[in-house]
Image (tube, grey):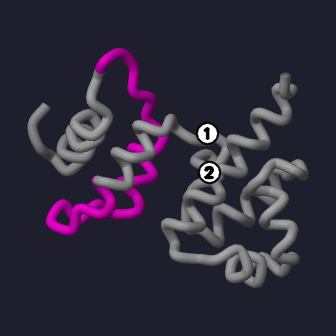
Amino acid sequence: MPTIETQISASIGKAIQFWRKIEGLTQKDLAERLNVMRSYIAKVERAHVGISHGRIKEFAEVLGISPYTILNGMPGDKEIKALLNIYSDIPFKLTKEEMEIIFRQEVVGGVDPEKFFRHIVDVSRGGGI
């Protein structure tokens, strides 16, 4: 069974990979912006190496997100699918900042993640509750 440290590193690595792909960056692109080797990015994303708080801050700056978003780790598969559906919905025009807000939300119970996330965005845009 993986240690808690390994689980945390895996979650952080997956979050970095997710946001890297949202930005349309390859591992090589990200490595160049951080002045590190591409293999280091691969190792971080696969949790083969640990990552310091300072390095998380650097990743966050390059990816244009909060370090907290990286530290928060990854939502579940259903939530990720809902996030990507909303993000790719051109008429909805979800901003990166809005995506970061809903990325951090935990969906509990039998709630439909996509409806839940759209509601959060609607409320943040001044819509109904």
Sooner in the amino-acid sequence: mark 1 or mark 2:
2
- Which region shows up in magenta? 86-110
The image quarter in which residue 111 lies:
top left
Count of marks placed on residues = 2
Amino acid on which disc 1 is placed: Asn
- The mark lying in front, picked from 1 and 2, is 2
Q: Looking at this view, name the residue that lies furthest to the top.
A: 109
> SS of the residue at dot 2?
helix
The image quarter in which residue 40 lies:
bottom right
In the rendered structure, find residue 121 and report the number of the disc placed on it.
none
Q: CA distance from mark 1 to mark 2?
A: 8 Å
Going 56% across and 57% down the picture, which residue do you hit? 18
The image quarter in which residue 38 lies:
bottom right
- Do labels 1 and 2 touch, CB within 8 Å? yes
Read off the residue under disc 1.
72
User: Within the magenta stretch, is there residue 101?
Assistant: yes
Q: Looking at this view, name the residue that lies furthest to the front.
A: 1
Going 59% across and 77% down the picture, which residue do you hit? 25
User: Within the magenta stretch, is there residue 107?
Assistant: yes
Read off the residue under disc 2.
15
Front position in the image: 94 or 83:
83
